[in-house]
Amino acid sequence: MNKTPFNKILIGFAFSPNLKANVFEAMRLAEFLGAHLYFLHVGSKSPAKAKTFTEILEESPVQPKNFTVLWDEGAPIETISEQCKKNQIDLLLLGAMQRENMVKFYMGSIARKLTRNAPCSVLLMIKPSIVRKPSQHIVVNAFESKETENTIRNAFHFAQALSASKLTLVEEIDRSEVTEEADDDRGLRKVTLRKEKLKRRELSRVREILTHIPDTLKENIKIQSQSIFGTRGYSIGHYAKVVRADLLIMNSDEKRKRFLERIFPKDLEHILSELPTDVLIIKSKQNG
Amino acid sequence: MFAGFVVSLVALPLGLGLAIASEAPPIAGILSAVVGGVVVALLGGSQLTIAGPGNGLVIVLLSSITLLGGGDLYQGYLFTLAAVVLSGILIFLFGLFRFGALSEFFPASALQGMLAAIGIGILAKQAHVMLGVTTASGSPFDLLAQIPHSILYVFRNPTIEVLLAATLGVGSFLILILYSRIRNPIFHLVPAPMWVVVLAIGLTYYYEFVAAIPYPMGKNLLITLPENLLGNLPFPNFGKLGSLEFIGIVISLTLISCIESLLSIKAVDKLDPLKRRSSVNKDLRALGIATTISGFVGGLNVVTVIARSSVNINNGGSSRSANLFHALFLLLFIVLFQDQIQRIALPALAAILVYTGYRLAAPENLIMLFRIGKEQGAIYIVTLAMTLAYGLITGITFGVLATFIIHVLINKSVFFFTRNWLKPNVLMFQEEDSGSYFVSIKNFCSFLNFYKLKALLDEIPEHKHVIVDFSLCEFVDHTVMEGLSDYRRSFLSKNGVFEIIGLDVHFSDTQHPFAIRKVLPIKDFLNLGKHLTKRQKTLEILAKNLNWSYRPELSSEVNNLEQFEYFGSKQINYQYNVSFDKSEQLTLFDLSYSEGAFIAKEDLKSSFLMIRLEEKVPQFILDKEHLLASLYEPLGYRDIDFFEAPDFSRRFFLGGKNREEIKKWFTPELIFFFESHSYFYVEANENTLLIKGRDRLSSIDEIKKMLAFGKELIQILK
């Protein structure tokens, strides 16, 4: 098995109806990635709680080699970030916590805070299930950014580990890069030409990145590239939903510099507020 | 240039009439048409539109002139000119900042309601003038109520003066109504409004030379033009610049100008035989400049006008020069025929306006909306009533509110709209493997956010394949469905494919009854009885005897008809009485289609025969050689003549894209065939031949002749 960059995985758990599904998903993932799994419960430890949890663990058909159960008390978000730092976690799992409509909203707001605070990548699972549903199609962002290459590399690791069959690289191109307007026939032709040109540019950029990825990682995966003109961060989410992707992999937010960007939702915000599918947010680490 | 001439014939009476209806000096209407024609032709972004004074503005201008003048109409006119100048500047800015999408923020039904209100406003006032009564005044409701009174007045005072005025008015009105019924090409060379003018002027000459008595028409019913055209141009009075009324009028003028122009430009693009797309914003800028200039020289607002534009198209106009020539001809008329123009009596012009108002109010629109959905009818009526009672701005605001409230009620949630309104909700991408475009819409799509979808669709070349997916979208309103059907039309006419998917869910779901398929309502609307007419029964028997299938019902699915040049500047409504043989080689059908738009609109029904051949034939048009054959010139077709067949060359117009191939294809045998049979319009496209009967539905005998013609033609082509 390939050595993936995800060696240590942490999942926070609460005693919700989804607990079993969340735990099973986490154990499967740890198995696929060959990683050490940490379970973290934020809250007091009681014998009854510990018993329920152990029972669930034992039910799982997959039993990873190494796992640790942590119990800690404090404010959830800070505690989780704290533990991630302490244990040098590479990937934080967040399962759906409630079943109702509020799930997305609730998860989105927690995820937003955690992705900002946590020192590692975050995987949001919107539909954890007890029985394994194999991942087929992974959608990865590929817009122009320093972090993109790292994200794509990680995406390939993930795809191999989950044996996904298809990986689509989506280049979102901001409409403002097309200065022409399709007012009349001439304008339309100009817009079409300009779009073609931008697409070719993006495509060659993505091809360049792909050459840096070792061939072993690309084996058995159908790689596709798709450029979309539209609002960055929004279009890819909508696209993932349209093509019924199983996993969407994104760069973590870049530092927000300008005041305006802080106010208006950008990039990840659209995804986090809509959660079209499972989302993995890759945080590039300084050392790796 | 010919088209420009014909358009000027229409523009002259309309310009005079619209100005008079707004209580402005008659010359003001002509001035705005002249300025509009010149400026928009030079600076505009569309090819076929004609600019001039618009009927939508009559109500605003009228209230402005009476309100600002405070009784003194001439002072009011001067103040209004200032408002015109300012609104021109605003329109220019609208164009500059690309607000061309403005009209898309209004729900379609509310817009129709507003236009109907304008129509009723014009009709209510001018119906009196048409009967020769100029004293009626009051709100549109009062005016409507007074109409019976005016009719009685005519009968109670049967003096020659009163009777003549009323007869002239009613007679002119009849000409306008009956014009499209008479399909005589010579008669149709002169547009209907000009016939009215000819009648009105002719009458004065009759009295002068034949009866030799003074023209018995009241002084107040005749037009006066200024003696010296250039000498005393009125100058706008900016005295009321800051007043609230003034600002309200400027805003109304701007809004209505923009809406009327945008709707007209869109409608004209649909009629363009060359399927060009107009630059709306560029046109708005030009209209703004034209309006400002027009205001300074004493003219009214300049807008794009649909009726005159469609006359332009029908007479073979193909470039902006028609607009320019129309302006120049108008100028020429005013200079040369000043005396004759002053002979036109008001009742005749009023008849033109009443007809215009009637077409704007068109009750059939309301019936149509009720068929689409009761709520659409309700929106229409609310807007109509509010506009008549409280003016345009209030009316349209109420229309928008009513629409929104109805949408909220249907979805049982305000939150659904407020939460998702400003969020992006559309995705478009070109599939890398197939090259077709995929458009997906989330949440809801209504008049509130249709502009986002439009912006994407506008960037897709029309010859491509587009799939619009609504499966993630919970609510689609009537405005969107109507807009999409326009897109579908323009894609079809350029050989593209425009598919809408994902609406089936909505249809079965009772929570969203609003997801109407705009394309279909015609079907249940006109399919009134299950009983077949006598003609239909005979057609059925004919089909049975030939062992064909026969379907009497209406269908808006007209496969590939749009690709024929014949329908280039026409709109196809529906197809019915379709019969076809087993192999579907021959298809016989009746078709309803329309030519022109608005008051120049003519609805036609004709019988067609379509023949599918096994081999591809060169594209060509074969028509009777006549005066109007010059109509094919804009398509770039010149008559192909055969040296060896002078008779054929003299009697037929033959044109097409590839002259050499056509010449080769027309064998002497084929030429003899056409020479020896009765005339039919024949057009070939790919491997289909379209044969058209008369300009009306063909009788059974004629249909049999057409069939025989088609069958023999197939034999010869084998």
Image (cartoon, coloured by chain):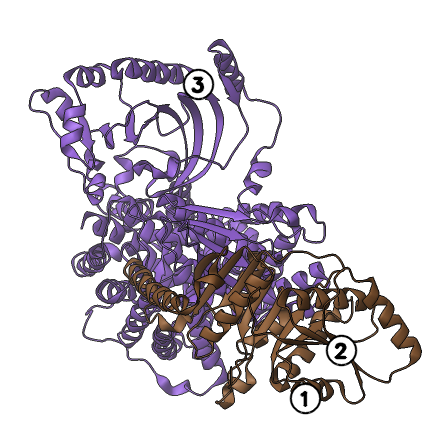
Q: Nearer the viewer, residue B169 or A110?
A: A110
Secondary element under disc 1, as helix, strand or loop, is: helix
Q: Is residue A38 above or below residue B26?
A: below
Nearest to viewer (mark 1 / mark 3): 1
Q: Where does residue A206 sit, x and y in percent of width and height?
A: 39, 67
Protein chain holding label 2: A
Residue B583 circle label: 3
Q: Where does residue B113 sit, x and y in percent of width and height?
A: 55, 58
Instruction: Identify the image quadrant of residue B240.
Output: bottom left
Residue drawn at 62 percent across, 75 percent down: A7
Secondary element under disc 3, as helix, strand or loop, is: loop
Instruction: Identify the image quadrant of residue B288.
Output: bottom left
Give the amino acid type for the residue marked by disc 2 in the picture: Thr
Q: Colour of chain B?
A: purple
Protein chain holding label 1: A
Mark 2 closeness class: few <14, some 14–19, many ≥20 residues within 10 Å = few
Residue drawn at 50 percent across, 62 percent down: B427
Q: Are marks 1 and 3 on the same chain?
A: no
- Report the residue that reaches farthest toward the top: B545
Q: Are marks 2 and 1 on the same chain?
A: yes
Residue B66 circle label: none
Q: Is residue B324 above or below residue B272?
A: below
Q: Where does residue A2 sit, x and y in percent of width and height?
A: 55, 66
In the picture of the structure, the residue carrying the numbered disc 1 is: A86
Q: Is residue B181 above or below residue A74?
A: above
In the picture of the structure, the residue carrying the numbered disc 2 is: A68
Q: Are marks 2 and 3 on the same chain?
A: no
Q: Is residue B600 above or below residue B591?
A: below
Residue B8 makes an appearance in the image: yes
